[in-house]
Amino acid sequence: MEAENSPFYILGIEGSANKIGISVITSSGKILSNPRFTYITPPGTGFLPNETAAHHRSKLLPLLAQSLKEAGVTMSQINLIAYTKGPGMAPPLSVGAICARTLSLLYGVPIIGVNHCVAHIEMGRHATGLQNPVVLYVSGGNTQVIAFADGKYRIFGETIDIAVGNCLDRFARLANISNDPAPGYNIEQMAKLGKRYVKMPYIVKGMDMSFSGILSFCEDLILTHPVLKNESGFIQKEQRPLTSEEKDEKASDEESDSEDEEAELLRKRKTIKRKNIKNKNIKDFEYDKNDLCFSLQETIFCMLTEVTERAMAHVGADSVLIVGGVGCNERLQTIIKAMLEERGGALGAMDERYCIDNGAMIAYTGWLMHSSGLSDSIETALFTQNFRTDEVDVRWRTNVQ
Ligand code: MG
């Protein structure tokens, strides 16, 4: 297809959550550029789909120009356009998909839609060199323990409610911890200062995990604590009398805003007589925010490690690859490493350049798909919020263990 010495360039576009990233790589897997922008919201708030999409639209063209410039190529040199097909939030996904289709039509370049989760796995294998690891995929939207079997990435264990990163993000909102640069990063730093372990619910059911009960438990710990409750973003807003302007504003947008719905839920819960927290050690409220960060991390990371170890035993794997935004957490890496040392296994972990959502992982996986004969057309290059890891036909990997 191409002349022997002319490089094959792939453009990768990622925008499934609060990051928009565009990368240029070559078919040998060399990353020529990989810039991204993150939509950061104020403490006590999360990113809403339409606002996130508006952020991505505003960054898209400067980011494309920056990515091409850093790579030293022009759009007319691009041979393949890969973009995130799903899973993710629909409005931000649509930004990437529309951009990819527009560029594909304008420049007459083949287009291919990529599964975001599979892209994390392939980027991880490429960056660490691990051939057949058990994959622990932990991010704001996903919590899965995955291994390759019979031509697909099979999910051995997963969350039965919210994702682990979502649990951390929402804990940060409750505790009024900053979202800059990321709530999980700030929790990790505060956890280092924690001195006391507060016992929390540890919920592993078979190979699956639950995080929503832990979050409710933390909510109780914060909202019944004489000091911490005053630091909670929600309660602060409630305790201060509203100005007349705020009252008008509140009446007009209360129904439509999901952040307000969440505050309303908290208000209702406050009026319900709180259960006595059974753990005697914490009755005296001798814990602070750092202790809660520490205890939350230890509990959820040990749950993840337990399920990962069981999956390794099941498939006979001797290595673990951690991918997704939460995978950057050094404490999680340390706990997994301790488990692996006992089993004589290896850990593949990446730094934030490749662990966190980025365009290069989409470009690289798009290339693997394209070179194994998979393709999309303008008609099929759509996006979908629900796109499971095990739906993808992983043709580029032989089924040899
Ligand atoms: Mg991700």
Image (cartoon, helix red, strand yellow):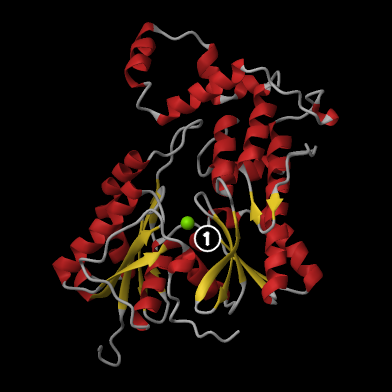
Quarter residue 135 falls in:
bottom right
Residue toward you, 319 or 251: 251
User: To which quarter of the image does residue 64 belong?
Assistant: bottom left
Q: Residue at x 77, y 74 (%)?
A: 344
Front residue of 164 and 329: 164
Secondary structure of the residue carrying numbered label 1: helix
Taking 93 as reference, is 209 left or right? right
Instruction: Locate the C terminus by quadrant.
Output: bottom right
Percent of width and height locating residue 190: 67, 39
Up the image or down, 359 lies above or below 395; here it is: above
Q: Position of residue 221 (x, y in %)?
A: 69, 28
The reply, left or right, for residue 107 in relation to residue 362 is left
Can residue 65 be seen here? The reply is no
From the image, tell me which residue sits under label 1: 355
Identify the residue shown where x is 65% and y is 38%: 213
Looking at the picture, which amino acid does disc 1 mark? Cys
Q: Residue at x 72, y 23 (%)?
A: 275
Image height of 275 relative to 394, above or below:
above
